[in-house]
Amino acid sequence: MTDTVGKVYLVGAGPGDPGLLTLKGKILLESADVVIYDALVSPEILAKISPQAEQIDAGKRMGRHSLLQSETTELLISKAREYPVVVRLKGGDPFIFGRGGEEMEDLIAAGISVEVVPGVTSGIAAPAYAGIPLTHRNYSSSVVFVTGHEMAGKYRPGVNWSAIAQCAETIVVYMGVRNLDAIARELIAAGLAQETPIALVRWGTTPAQQELVATLGTIVDRVAAQQFEAPSIAVIGNVVKLHETLGNWYLDRNPKAEMLDTDS
């Protein structure tokens, strides 16, 4: 038996474009009693929340933590004992570098009913909006997703960049801009050529989208010159070459989006 009266839904908000929110996610936002959301959820998605719902910002950004992870979990448990429908709204997909698995473990341990509503992850959507297919019969038949934001003592084991360099033809790096120098050096040391193409997509799928294309050998200098910042997705591999011919569809649709200087 449990005194829980409600249920927590771990909902993926998608990468930013409100059109990429799932229908199930939209219905839950419209019917939720309380929504606890992350920092990278777009204003257009937040606007879909019921006006009657309590809204709580639990966002985490580099250098600013609205709530500690343990506090967020305690809040979810508390609200589930107060409201019938609690939505935990997370940018992208809850289980792709979103700590959704950790939150679900804690909720189940506390006897809270929980359901996952997957979302479109930025690691797929941002490259697509930049005209970069992650797989292509002429360029890549394998892809790997990896976090570029490692914290000492938090991840076990640390990312083995040497193995990553050899295991897939396309590498997608989340949260890697601040560690890009080290990542590029590790991948080159592991055997990737300095001429390997790399694309960074910032604020992917939104009107503020920016794209920067270079090579592993030049990307760090290009990022510094362009003052390119997080949040960005990095795509590494020969599929990036397709950006030149496929990358205009989103720019044509959204003239506010920007393609920065690229390597020739």
Image (cartoon, rainbow, N blue to C red):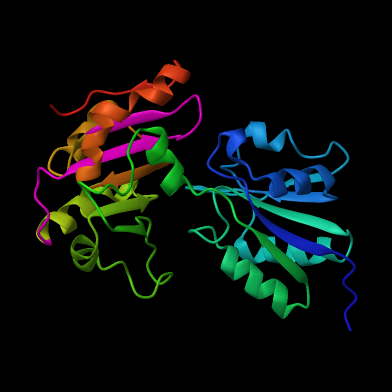
Viewer-closest of 71 and 119 = 119
Percent of width and height locating residue 162: 19, 66
The residue that appears at 34% across and 49% down in the rendered structure is 176
Q: Nearer the viewer, residue 262 or 125?
A: 125
In front here: 186 or 240?
A: 240
Magenta segment, which residues? 190-213
Q: Is residue 77 magenta?
A: no
Quarter of the image containing the N terminus?
bottom right
Question: Could you tell me residue 126's position as x and y percent?
Answer: 42, 39
Please report the residue visible at 55 percent of the width from the left and 62 percent of the height from the top: 99
Q: Quadrant of residue 3?
A: bottom right
- Residue 217 placement: quadrant: top left
| Residue 241 left/right relative to 121 | left
* Residue 160 visible from this viewpoint: yes
Taking 44 as reference, is 99 left or right? left
Q: Estimate the x, y position of residue 12 in percent, counting from the top left.
A: 61, 51
Q: For the C terminus, give its image quadrant.
A: top left
Residue drawn at x 90%, y 68% as measured from the top left: 5
Rendered view: 67 above or below 223: below
Tell me residue 55's x, y (percent). 77, 44
Q: Residue furthest top?
A: 255
When the figure is inspected, residue 156 is found, relative to residue 203, above or below; the finding is below
- Badge count: 0
Q: Does residue 230 show up? A: no
Identify whether 183 is placed above or below 226.
below
Residue 44, image quadrant: top right
Q: Residue at x 41, y 70 (%)?
A: 155
**Left or right of 106: which side holds 205?**
left
Q: Is residue 205 magenta?
A: yes
Image-based side of 117 in relation to 233, left or right: right
